[in-house]
Image (tube, grey):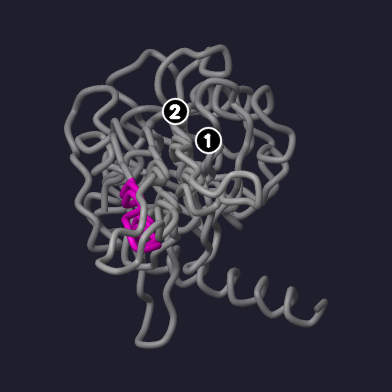
Amino acid sequence: MRFVDEAEIRVEAGSGGSGIATFRREKYIPMGGPDGGDGGDGGSVYLVATENVNTLADFRYHSLHKAQRGQNGMGRNCTGRKGDDLYISIPPGTTVYESNTDEKIGDLINPGDTLLVAKGGFHGLGNTRFKSSVNRTPQQFSKGKPGELRTLKLELMVIADVGLLGMPNAGKSSLIRSVSSAKPKVADYPFTTLHPNLGVVRVDALRSFVIADIPGVIEGAAEGAGLGLQFLKHLSRTGLLLHIVDVQPYETQDTPVEAAQKIIHEIQKWSDDLAGKPRWLVLNKVDRLLQEETEAHCIAIVKELDWDGPVFKISALKKQGTKDLMYAIMDYLDQQRQDDSEQE
């Protein structure tokens, strides 16, 4: 389930309809007086978090969204029809910013959350409104006000239970393919993953969790290099991070320990909160090692990293050890949810 993490759109509320200056003209009723009606208000633009929408990709091809204009007033004191409001469906977990100032407008987390982002223009007044004891035949009327026009930046906050961290080609996409129905692109070159991917892992009929794969992180990412940390902000709501390490990388000169240390260093520079999240070490591609060498090789990596948390040895490509890992994650998340429920 591929998604675009950010999108920019322009929203334009409808202008208010103008009032009108008319006079009552009926047979046998001389000097009927003014009867110009008011215009209708312009339609407003709302963003609505919708459960069955999970991507911002459509906004790349449809960036302008306009609400309906209010109808002009009519004779016989008939008011123009109000313009229809425009409701734009977005994924739950989207944060909305004013594009020009980066001011946060709102955060739509739960399905059904609604946010007004552009207010429709106020209607114009017909000449009936200007009638008075000293002005029995007013000629004046007012035009409707223009609707708000804004450029918005939408930022999708991935609501995932588990996030995958790792260097390019560490095997994150292969893991998410092997344990879920998500089908991210997998190939033997850096930056195969250009967009985040979500997958639903169902361990049994009643239990499941969401896992998020992001582009690989490289050294210097905190200063803007590469693609990975551009998306780390989307993992801020995950409950658990899996640090995927290639136990025998062919594509780089870094050892597994050096690659893992670079990731740790980059996330510490990026965010203390993210660095402090629960993180498990997942040693991937153990199928590349001889069976008699696997245990000693993995123990050496863990020892050199001075890692004291959970460690799993897997081969995502061969689905070796992935089932045990997924059940361990599910048990951990269930326990966390139970603890949170008891605290409430």
Residue at 49% of width from left, 24% of height from top?
259
Main SS, magenta residues: loop
Vertical arrangement, residue 319 with respect to residue 56, above or below:
below
Tag 1's secondary structure?
helix
Tag 2's secondary structure?
helix
Residue 168 percent location from the top left of the image: 35, 27
10 Å neighbourhood of mark 1: few (<14), some, or many (≥20)? many
Q: Residue furthest bottom?
A: 205
**Amino acid at the residue labelled 1:** Leu
Is residue 344 one of those drawn in magenta? no
Q: Nearer the viewer, residue 344 or 38?
A: 38
Residue at 41% of width from left, 49% of height from top?
42
The Cα–Cα distance between marks 2 and 1, rounded to whole angstroms, is 7 Å
* Contact check, label 2 and label 1, Cβ < 8 Å: yes
Q: Is residue 227 left or right of residue 236?
A: left
- Give, as a single range, the part of the protein colored magenta: 67-87
Residue with the mark numbered 2: 228
Q: Nearer the viewer, residue 120 or 171?
A: 120
Q: Which mark is residue 60?
A: none
Residue 192 percent location from the top left of the image: 24, 30
Quadrant into which the C terminus falls? bottom right
Q: Which mark is residue 232?
A: 1
Residue at 54% of width from left, 31% of height from top?
98
Residue 246 percent location from the top left of the image: 39, 35
Residue at 47% of width from left, 68% of height from top?
111
**Amino acid at the residue labelled 2:** Gly
Q: Nearer the viewer, residue 126 or 229?
A: 126
Q: Can you see residue 326?
A: yes
